[in-house]
């Protein structure tokens, strides 16, 4: 059995999907579009299994945005890549029944077995609404189950009802008499045109006729428009209704809502309120959520609170994650020593030590920060706060040429630009959708976090957690400012046009469900770990090979060792070449200096070193050396690979095989031949600016191509973002060098 899960946005549909399927779910994309397809398996009380499809949220079956169209096509059985649903479970917000029943009224017209999941019953009770599932069942003629999805209440009854779903009787819509007459004529024409082995009831043909008359030309009925006698009947109906001043679409919507009002009046017992004279002069909010919204959605205080929440997030990324990261780093170091100790010196040992533990391990260390980021975003979303943040940002976004609906895709891009760009499908205007896609990669995604943390932790650790959090916040703000600036420019050039209206439903506040939040964190963190175990692992091995081969010739290695020892050991040095001014170095210090010199020579001699030195003249004005160039090139595959590439570059060639050198320490100790440090706080800032502004993710590049339908816009994005990153980093380093 295939079960389609439908419902309005913010109705708790995804929570119900998780409650039905648990961890037995998978995510893919519908073929031909970038709309996400979530499918899970649910075990019914009789022991059988059913496949549950979580459809995108939609208010109506008259689709506008791509995700709404997919939901409509699946429900109508149009898509050939998805099995037609045997049962439709529509999730309804019990605290806002009148709005949610409009979709139910359209689903009734489909003639498919239907179950109504009356969700958020606890919210309705807190608002003083007594919603009777039994009375609604009598009104609709299909199973109706009262549930609280985020607490798992009523889920077992819902599973039982799926096996007993029935087709709802067609309501008698209170349409104008003239429209009813035309629907009878068109429906009769349809019954002649579409013969079936088991003829449909006449009211089902009238439902199709109603869709044709109001202008719904979806793929399942579009061919009927041009066929006789339907074509002539539709033309005649349209002319007659136009002469009578009847708009079929408006009349249809009004008829549905008149039916909804009559149903709600018999199903919902409204709370009794005593309204005094003063209430009309100075009305008070009727619910706690209204009083909270008065603060969180305030045009000034709301923004201050939002900034405070985001600042707290960045502080937590350092303060909470630091001890966990240190523990993971120690564990990786110990495991690396344990694994490589029995191995003999050679390429295999170097691969395991440098390519895997110093490559992939340096990225895995940042998993706690990734998990904390997703934890905060999941809590904010599940609590209902993110919609308020979108409301707050609408005025600001409109001024720079973005749609209010752009906020959620942009906020999603802080986790990853790919789902953020895919989320732009909810924006109806292609022009505003394109503008949002072009600026979404400026949002600092979770892949940038390892780079930010490495650079900030290495060069600003002495300034304290608050300063580090401030620098991190600055990186995010710089990305936001870049997005705002470019969107403002695009609004007046590439995406020029009138602004469209922004309609947003504010969901009810609710306490985030721990299981749902943890499931979201786990799925996103698992995706990051999977990437570390596949993509980053493969790239780390390739980078290790580029940094390891060709190996330094033995004669050259011996010469470097001799020269280094001669510079440090007075017994080997010429009296004029070496004049002891400090305490004589120990043997361990001399060995370390030799290892560092040989590692530096090996790095320069390797394929990676040659590639880095080739591009060094271009990046030198930014303060970058060839090692950073190797990292920048590797980061085009995935930004976080920069960290693993630095771990490899700074470890390959070292002789202390039984101990791991901390990457931050190695970077701070790196010197040019003249003794000048390679890495400075200014260089770190310049590199941070580059990673904030540059387009360095091939996966994002690919998804932009799919969303825009060609190479033009992704190539444009690649060019303008990287040129902007180069110019700003150049200005930062060159101006900073004059004062520091």
Image (spheres, rainbow, N blue to C red):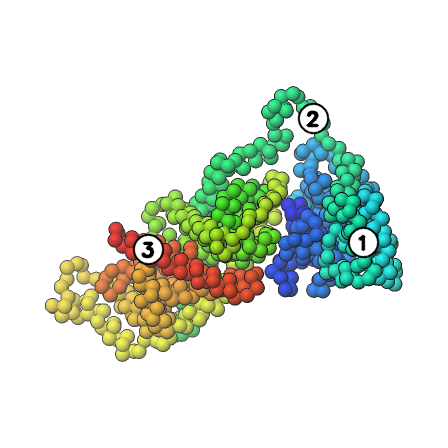
Residue 716: x and y in percent read 47, 62
Q: CA distance from mark 3 to mark 2?
A: 64 Å
- SS type, badge 1: helix
Q: CA distance from mark 1 to mark 2?
A: 51 Å
Residue 454: x and y in percent read 39, 55
- SS type, badge 3: helix
Residue drawn where x is 21% and y is 71% of the image: 563
Residue 90 placement, left or right of 355:
right
Does 152 appear above or below 656? above
Q: Which mark is residue 236?
A: 1
Residue drawn where x is 49% and y is 45% of the image: 399
Q: Nearer the viewer, residue 68 or 348?
A: 68
- SS type, badge 2: loop
Q: Which mark is residue 359?
A: none
Lower sequence index among marks 3 and 2: 2
Q: Nearer the viewer, residue 609 or 48?
A: 609
Q: Quadrant of the N terminus?
A: bottom right
Q: Nearer the viewer, mark 3 or mark 2?
A: 3
> Do the numbered discs 3 and 2 sit on residues whose CB atoms are within 8 Å?
no
Name the residue beneath numbered marker 2. 273
Q: Which mark is residue 731?
A: 3
């Amino acid at each position: 059995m295939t079960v389609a899960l439908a419902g309005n946005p913010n109705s708790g549909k995804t929570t119900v999907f998780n409650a039905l399927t648990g961890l037995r779910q998978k995510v893919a994309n519908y073929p031909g579009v970038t709309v996400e397809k979530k499918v899970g398996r649910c075990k019914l009380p009789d022991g059988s299994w059913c496949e549950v499809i979580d459809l995108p949220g939609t208010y109506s079956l008259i689709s506008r945005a791509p995700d709404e169209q997919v939901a409509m096509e699946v429900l109508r059985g149009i898509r050939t890549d998805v099995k037609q649903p045997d049962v439709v479970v529509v999730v309804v917000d019990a605290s806002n029944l009148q709005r949610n029943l409009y979709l139910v009224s359209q689903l009734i017209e489909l003639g498919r077995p239907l179950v109504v999941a009356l969700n958020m019953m606890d919210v309705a009770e807190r608002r003083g609404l007594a919603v009777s599932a039994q009375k609604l069942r009598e009104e609709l003629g299909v199973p109706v189950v009262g549930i609280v999805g985020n607490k798992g209440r009523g889920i077992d009854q819902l599973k039982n009802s799926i096996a007993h779903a029935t087709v709802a009787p067609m309501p008698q819509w209170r349409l104008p008499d003239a429209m009813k007459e035309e629907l009878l004529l068109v429906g009769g024409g349809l019954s002649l045109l579409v013969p079936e082995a088991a003829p449909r009831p006449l009211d089902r043909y009238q439902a199709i006729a109603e869709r044709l008359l109001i202008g719904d030309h979806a793929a399942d009925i579009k061919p009927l428009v041009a066929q006789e006698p339907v074509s002539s009947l539709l033309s005649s109906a349209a002319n007659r209704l136009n002469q009578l001043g009847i708009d079929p679409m408006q009349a249809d919507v009004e008829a549905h809502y008149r039916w909804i009002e009559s149903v709600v009046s018999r199903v919902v017992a409204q709370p009794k309120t005593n309204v005094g004279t003063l209430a009309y002069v100075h009305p008070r909010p009727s619910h706690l959520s209204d009083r909270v919204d008065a603060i969180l959605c305030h045009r000034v205080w709301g923004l201050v609170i939002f900034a405070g929440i985001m600042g707290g997030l960045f502080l937590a990324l350092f303060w909470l994650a630091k001890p966990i990261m240190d523990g993971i780093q120690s564990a990786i170091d110990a495991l690396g020593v344990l694994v490589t100790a029995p191995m003999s010196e050679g390429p295999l040992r170097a691969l395991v030590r440098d390519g895997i533990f110093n490559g992939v391990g340096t990225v895995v260390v940042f998993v706690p920060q990734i998990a904390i980021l997703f934890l905060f975003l999941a809590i904010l979303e599940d609590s209902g706060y993110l919609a308020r943040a979108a409301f707050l940002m609408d005025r600001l976004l409109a001024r720079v040429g973005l749609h209010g609906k752009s906020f959620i895709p942009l906020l999603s891009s802080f986790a990853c630009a790919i789902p953020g760009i895919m989320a732009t499908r909810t924006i109806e205007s292609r022009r505003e959708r394109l503008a949002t896609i072009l600026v979404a990669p400026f949002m600092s995604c979770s892949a940038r976090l390892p780079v930010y943390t490495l650079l900030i932790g290495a060069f600003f650790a002495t300034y304290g957690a608050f300063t580090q959090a401030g620098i991190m916040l600055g990186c995010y703000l710089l990305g936001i400012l870049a997005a705002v600036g470019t969107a403002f420019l695009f609004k007046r050039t590439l995406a020029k046009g009138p602004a469209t209206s922004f309609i947003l439903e504010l969901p009810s506040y609710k306490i985030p469900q721990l299981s749902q939040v943890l499931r979201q964190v786990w799925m996103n963190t698992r995706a990051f770990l999977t990437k570390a175990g596949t993509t980053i692992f493969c790239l780390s091995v390739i980078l290790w090979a580029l940094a390891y081969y060709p190996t330094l010739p033995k004669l050259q290695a011996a010469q470097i060792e001799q020269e280094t020892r001669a510079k440090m050991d007075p017994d080997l040095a010429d009296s004029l070449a070496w004049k002891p001014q400090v305490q004589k170095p120990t043997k361990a210090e001399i060995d370390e200096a030799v290892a560092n010199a040989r590692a530096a020579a090996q790095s320069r001699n390797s394929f990676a070193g040659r590639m880095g030195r080739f591009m060094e003249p271009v990046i030198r004005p930014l303060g970058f050396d060839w090692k950073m160039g190797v990292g920048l090139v590797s980061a085009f595959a995935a930004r976080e690979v920069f960290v693993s590439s630095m771990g490899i570059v700074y470890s390959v060639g070292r002789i202390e095989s039984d101990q791991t050198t901390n990457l931050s320490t190695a970077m701070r100790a790196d010197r040019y031949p003249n003794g000048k440090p390679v890495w400075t706080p200014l260089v770190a800032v310049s590199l941070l600016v580059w990673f904030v502004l540059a387009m360095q993710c091939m996966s994002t590049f690919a998804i932009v191509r799919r969303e825009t339908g060609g190479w033009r816009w992704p190539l444009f994005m690649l060019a303008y973002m990287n040129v902007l990153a180069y110019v700003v980093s150049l200005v930062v380093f060159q101006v900073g060098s004059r004062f520091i």
